[in-house]
Image (cartoon, rainbow, N blue to C red):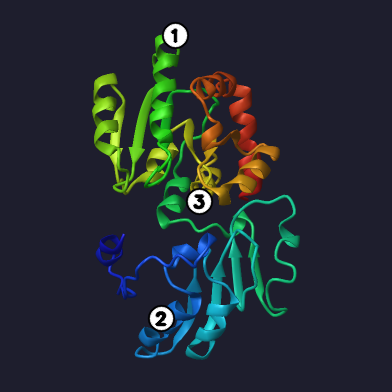
Amino acid sequence: MNDLAREQGFELKILPVADPNDYLTGYGKWLTVTQEQDAAETIEIVRKMDKAERLVVDSYAIDCTWEKMLRPYVGEIMVIDDLANRQHDCDVLLDQNFYLHKEMRYQGLVPAHCRMLLGPEYALLREEFYRVKAQMRERDGRLRNIVVFYGGVDATDETSKAIDDLLVLRQLGGLIKVKVTVVVGAGNGRKEAIAKRCTEVGFTYLCQVSNMAELMAEADLMLGAGGSTTWERCYLQLPAIVTAVAENQFQICEDCAAAGLIYYLGHWDQVKQGDICRAIKEMSAPDKMLAMQRKMSQLME
């Protein structure tokens, strides 16, 4: 990820590597040091630069403790969050996710002056999605093309589960004329085995693509996770069968399913062989695909 940031032309400053701290718990372990130490090391970098107009914070391990220490060295502070489980000292808070009661989630957790950007209308989308949407074909509800993508790492190997079930469906006479494209990130530790399997069964295999928006626009159905890709799918009105692969995705997936935006299979450890088969059979009816597309269109207007 460091190399990718530099390749995109960004100046990157890296904090010192720290030995694991056994006293840290929960998301605090992600920093590897206390918030106070992390903030102090960040200040050492920031104070040597021109004063930043905006500091953007995106970490479940950081709260108002860290933010108050950085306050004198920056203009406004913007926080990206979706847990709503801790206090923030910020001027702008962005939570791009869909919740049934989004207005209530951050009450008492941010200053009175904080500007709240809540909901998918504030989704962080790359420019390619806007370009592709402008010239995207209109789907008719028929299933001709499936894209499989469970994130850059896919630590729980949902990709292999999906491939297994897609093969079962094909052996049963389904998906004969359906194109399947399997996409993995460079950080996927099983990418070589997945590539070999795709070659053997005739699925298209792609790694670390730069045209995800195009692949999604060409697809009729996506098998994926419940992270930020949710809003890319919604913007392109791409029906999806979704597995939650991290704790912070649970509530989002449940609320999206209740609103008809996704077909939700459950937590990664609940999804068993055959679940994706059954979901595809149920979803592949044109009326159900079109109904989900309409729901997404209404959400992202």
Q: Position of residue 43 (x, y in %)?
A: 42, 85
Q: Local crowd at mark 1 within 10 Å, few (<14), some, or many (≥20)?
A: few
Among the 4 quarters of the image, the one containing residue 26: bottom right
Q: Nearer the viewer, mark 1 or mark 2?
A: 2
Give the side of residue 42 with respect to residue 71, left or right.
left
**Residue 37 in view, yes or no:** yes
For marks 3 and 1, give the CA distance: 33 Å
Amino acid on which disc 3 is placed: Ser
Q: Nearer the viewer, mark 3 or mark 2?
A: 2
Front position in the image: 65 or 229: 65
The residue identified by callout 1 is 172
In primary-sequence order, the first of circles 3 and 2 is 2
Q: Position of residue 276 (x, y in %)?
A: 51, 25
The residue identified by callout 3 is 228
Tell me which residue sits at (37%, 87%) in the image: 44
Q: Position of residue 263 (x, y in %)?
A: 60, 32
Give the side of residue 157 with respect to residue 259, left or right.
left
Q: Secondary structure at mark 2?
A: helix
Q: Secondary structure at mark 3?
A: loop
The residue identified by callout 2 is 42
